[in-house]
Image: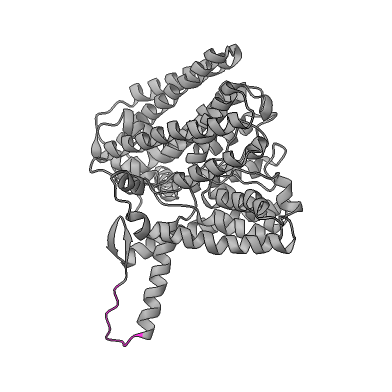
Amino acid sequence: MVLKPHLDDFKIIGYYLGKITIGIGLFMLIPIICALGFREIGPTLDFLIGIGVSFLSGFILTKACFTDRDLNWMQGMIVVSLSWLVATIIGAIPLHLSGHFKSYLDACFDAMSGFSTTGLTLVQDLDHLSYTHNLWRHLIMFIGGQGIVIVALSLFVKGLSGAFKMYVGEARDERLLPNVIHTARFIWLVSVVYLILGTLALSIAAISGGIKIHNALFHSVCIFMTAFDTGGFSPQSQSILYYHNASFEIITIVIMILGAINFNLHYHLWSGKLKELFHNIEIKTFSLSVIIIFIITAVGLERVMLYLTPGALFRKGFYQFISAHTGTGFQTVYAQQFINGWSQLSLTGLIFAMSLGGAVCSTTGAIKMLRIGIIMKAIKEDIRRIMLPEKAIVVQRFHHIKTIFLEDKQVRAALLISLCYLVLYSSGALVGMFFGHPFINSLFESTSATANVGLSCGITNAGMPAILKITYMIQMWAGRLEFMSIFTLLGFLIAAIKGK
């Protein structure tokens, strides 16, 4: 028998959702400061409207649903899944008011793409978008990369038990510090320190490339936020190709890789434990994956003789590859070049890279390296069991911050999440094929959306059917949260309708 949720469940969910809604409004103050600095009056009004809607909605929710009770597991998961939908709806308001989107759905598409750190976009005439709205596009990626709930953990949530449930619901189940709120604040500390250093490095490269100082600083802040949070938005429609700057590209590669690393590993590296780099299963798996899949991609490029020099192969081939593998989505080629120039083998290499992603507890999406490493360890263990005598005891272990003995529940969890991703990759491809796109193109775009990458072969555009837009939005949402909190929300809704 399915039990119907109690009124208290709705109140607790509404109260914490209201808190997060207010937090989103507070972040809109940053673009307003930018608008005042650049004397952009229209954008200022757009964000004042967005803040008004956010604060009013949050105030109503917190007052109508006021409670001093902590979250349980179900409620925490539901708050997380709903907070991303609310953030999308509210975050899209100033974007839609900018006049650079054909519909509010398109603005919501970009907001979901931003908060989920995907990078697919439907914006029109990006090159003439205001500084203020452009900053917001990149800022929501920075917020989404840290995690919308991290905002709540850092500012609003007091109960440690409820905080951890929300933290886990956002696809992060590793605490860096004993206190999960301190963990959230450490994540912000890491990000802000890298923001300062990365912006400085990118600014120097941009200025040396001939960009004026104020534009270089603005572009560098935006590019860092989306590179470190493996998002892929950029201030110009040509993405990283706009800069025609090898130094700029190399710096973004370093930042993308930093963003794809587990925050837990960042913590240990900051603590001086550099040996962890050479023992960690995620780093080993990522390195091996990069070598194998890039060979596949490079062979595919060589067969069509597209990039004949090492420099061209690095800046066009490897750059797209590492952008795909880290889940970032920066491009130094035009979308149509994937279709007209790249072979199906090289595109398949990019699809593999996108589908695997970076580390758990990082800003990247997709299946992730820890799960791939665990599955490989499980296969190795089963092979050893077959080859050794029946009475032999086979024990498999791996190093992830500490030495961990492989257990069936770890393998089952890794396989379950991996299977969910594969199903969603395939489902989105079928929808794309339904609307007449070739299989390889449909799978490429679907994988990019689900894995929160943002590379596009040209399918994503403002003229595509609304059903396809909504499909990609659902994929971005589910892929970013890694399914469990969304499954909980669906179960809650079913219980509310059919429960007794």
Q: Residue at position x 69%, y 45% from top?
A: 333
Left or right of residue 205: residue 306: right
Whole-percent x and y of residue 114? Answer: 53, 36
**Along the viewing direction, whichever of 325 and 268 lies nearer the viewer:** 268
Q: Residue at position x 55%, y 38% from top?
A: 113
Name of the residue lying farthest toward the right: 340
Whole-percent x and y of residue 369? Answer: 44, 57
- Magenta: main secondary structure equals loop
Q: Which residues are magenta?
A: 388-395
Left or right of residue 232: residue 20: left
Q: Residue at position x 63%, y 44% from top?
A: 331
Q: In which quarter of the view is residue 163 placed?
A: top left
Q: In which quarter of the view is residue 27 placed?
A: top left
User: Can the viewer see residue 3?
Assistant: no
Q: Residue at position x 57%, y 27% from top?
A: 216
Q: Is residue 231 magenta?
A: no
Total labels: the figure holds 0
Whether residue 310 is situated above or below residue 251 in the rendered picture? below
Whole-percent x and y of residue 494? Answer: 43, 47
**Along the viewing direction, whichever of 40 and 214 lies nearer the viewer:** 214
Whole-percent x and y of residue 427? Answer: 59, 55
Q: In which quarter of the view is residue 97 placed?
A: top right
Left or right of residue 168: residue 43: right
Whether residue 485 is situated above or below residue 342 in the rendered picture? above
User: Can the viewer see residue 488?
Assistant: yes
Left or right of residue 354: residue 280: left
**Along the viewing direction, whichever of 341 and 59 lies nearer the viewer:** 341
